[in-house]
Image (spheres, helix red, strand yellow):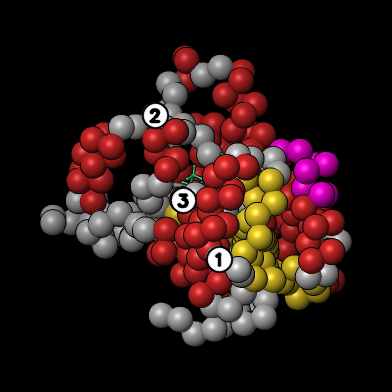
Amino acid sequence: METQALKGRVALVTGGTTGLGFGAAQRLIEEGAFVYITGRRQNVLDEAVAKLGTSAKGLQADAMKKADMLRVAEAIKAGHGHLDILFANAGGGHATPLEDLTEEQIDSELGINVKGVVLTVQSMLGVLRDGASVVLNASITADMGLPGFAVYAATKAAVRSLARSWTTDLKHRGIRVNTISPGVVPTEGYGHEQGMSDADVAAYVDRVSKEIPAGRVGSARDIADALVFLASDASRYIRGVDLVVDGGMTRVYAGKN
Ligand SMILES: NC(=O)c1ccc[n+]([C@@H]2O[C@H](COP(=O)([O-])OP(=O)(O)OC[C@H]3O[C@@H](n4cnc5c(N)ncnc54)[C@H](OP(=O)(O)O)[C@@H]3O)[C@@H](O)[C@H]2O)c1
């Protein structure tokens, strides 16, 4: 449902070219926001902006590089002068048995999910308006103990912790910081990050849907609707929370479907 709850707001979505970030950008625009999106691949960025239309602008940037994120902040300053909404979404990781985990994978997952989120928020401090809403993308894996996801899950636990600390660090500016923890939402990342084929994804969706009280996996729109809530004035009294958007998967017994 479209309410124009974000009319006139300016947002940044990191990793806004595919998956949850792209869905978030679409939804923020539907609600009246202008949205800057980032990603590393210029061609994918161009395609995403072409789909999003004139209320979006693409800025090629690697969230793990401070110089890139400061360049993004400069571009926003020159464009709109400020940010009302920041969705630090760029992230990823994949399952690997503990014995096979490499230094490269550990560095890469800590790099994008922790260092990247810290640099993103830090770099935007100069353009975030007092009273802005910052939302970090975490994950239900932080609660779960899923096989092979130890490092990824630990990075997402760190993301939840960052949000709580920043809630106090940014209290004097009225900037609210919260996290969203999506459940299972098949995206492009299931292919290129997890190495799953379309058939693998279909079989997984079929199996896992039975374990989800909502009876289905999530969609990018399910997550984006939660983001709109946390980005809007409707959540004005909410700070430092983790909003789990998983169809009840980690909180409720699914019973027999
Ligand atoms: N899908 C799920 O089931 C699920 C569940 C829980 C949490 N999450 C979280 O949701 C977020 C998005 O995941 P997704 O499933 O939507 O993945 P996705 O489809 O692979 O999208 C990832 C996005 O991030 C960008 N990106 C990756 N590394 C980046 C970097 N270093 N700098 C800037 N952009 C970068 C990608 O573009 P480039 O590759 O071109 O940079 C792409 O736009 C992640 O934080 C993930 O951990 C997902």
- Asked whether mark 3 lies closer than 8 Å to ligand 1, one says yes
Asked whether the beta carbons under mark 1 and mark 3 sit within 8 Å of each other, the answer is: no
Residue that carries the numbered disc 1 in the rendered image: 53
Residue 70 image point, x, y percent: 83, 49
Camera-nearest residue between 182 and 211: 182
> Which of pointers 3 and 2 lies earlier in the amino acid sequence?
3
Q: Is residue 70 magenta?
A: yes
Asked whether the beta carbons under mark 3 and mark 2 sit within 8 Å of each other, the answer is: no
Q: How far apart are the two marked residues, 1 and 3, measured between alpha carbons?
A: 17 Å
Residue shown at 42% from the left, 58% from the top: 220
The residue type indicated by label 2 comes to Gly
Residue that carries the numbered disc 3 in the rendered image: 19
Residue 84 image point, x, y percent: 71, 71
Which quadrant, please, contains the C terminus? Answer: bottom left
Q: Which mark is residue 189?
A: none
Crowding near the residue tagged with mark 1, few <14, some 14–19, many ≥20 C-alpha atoms within 10 Å: few
Q: Element at badge 1?
A: loop
Q: How far apart are the two marked residues, 2 and 1, measured between alpha carbons?
A: 31 Å
Residue 175 appearing in the image: no
> Which of pointers 2 and 1 lies earlier in the amino acid sequence?
1
Q: How far apart are the two marked residues, 3 and 2, measured between alpha carbons?
A: 15 Å
Which quadrant, please, contains the N terminus? Answer: bottom left
Please state the extent of the stretch shown in magenta in the rendering: 64-71
Q: Is residue 15 magenta?
A: no
Crowding near the residue tagged with mark 3, few <14, some 14–19, many ≥20 C-alpha atoms within 10 Å: some
